[in-house]
Amino acid sequence: MDIVGAAIGLVYVFSEYRASRWFWPSSLLMAAFYAVINFRIGWYANAGICFYNFVMSVYGLLVWRGLLVGTRRAASAEERPIGSCPARYWPWLIVATAALTVAFRFILALLGEATLPWLDGLSAALGIVGMWMLSQKYWQQWIFWLVSEPILVYIYLRSGYPASAVMYAVYEVFCIMGIIRWKRLSIS
């Protein structure tokens, strides 16, 4: 399961890097695989985030395609362009990440059997905010993944899932390449 999940994850990150709308189906599949893997290793916050990612994958596909009322280009058939996250959002994104980290840590402490609750909470919080930014097609979403990937490498290595750890190490390289590519393609 670890190797299959990692293979799907590599398709996922390559599609994300290319800003392909085909990224979203691989995101759905990856979320399903990693919900099971994360739950099995006692990484409950990230297992829950996989369910969130599943829902956000459907939402992101609709936003990118401009099929939701109220989203840019909703009336046209054009795909949403890569943009820059408005400066007014940054304080809220940082506060949301911090608040979610603390909330996850508190909830995981109540469960009592979670492994590495602070790291689990932080990586889950970064994932929530990063996935929302990705659904909006902001180039800065890569920054959130850049911070979370080393945490994920450590936890998967420690938990005995080396293929997943390698996958997230590869993601770290894609984060750097993604920042460069998406920023260059950004319309704002």
Image (cartoon, helix red, strand yellow):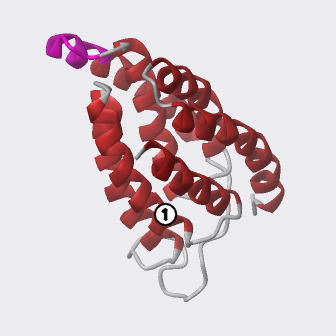
Q: Which residue is mark 1?
A: 26
92 inside magenta stretch? no
**In the image, what residue occupies the spot 46% across and 70% down?**
61
46 relative position to 78: left or right: left
Q: Magenta stretch: give its range.
A: 105-114
Label 1, secondary structure: give it.
Answer: helix
- Quarter-of-image position of residue 119: top left
53 up-or-down from 98: above or below? below
For residue 129, above or below residue 53: above
Q: Is residue 111 magenta-colored?
A: yes
Which is nearer the eye, 126 or 94?
126
Above or below for 31 versus 96: below
Question: Residue at the spot x=32%, y=58% of the render?
Answer: 55
For the stretch drawn in magenta, the main secondary structure is helix
Q: Residues within 10 Å of mark 1 (few under 14, many from 20)?
A: many
Residue drawn 53% across and 48% down? 133
The residue shown at (49%, 86%) is 75
Where residue 101 appears, as percent x and y from the top left, is 38, 21
Residue type at mark 1 is Ser
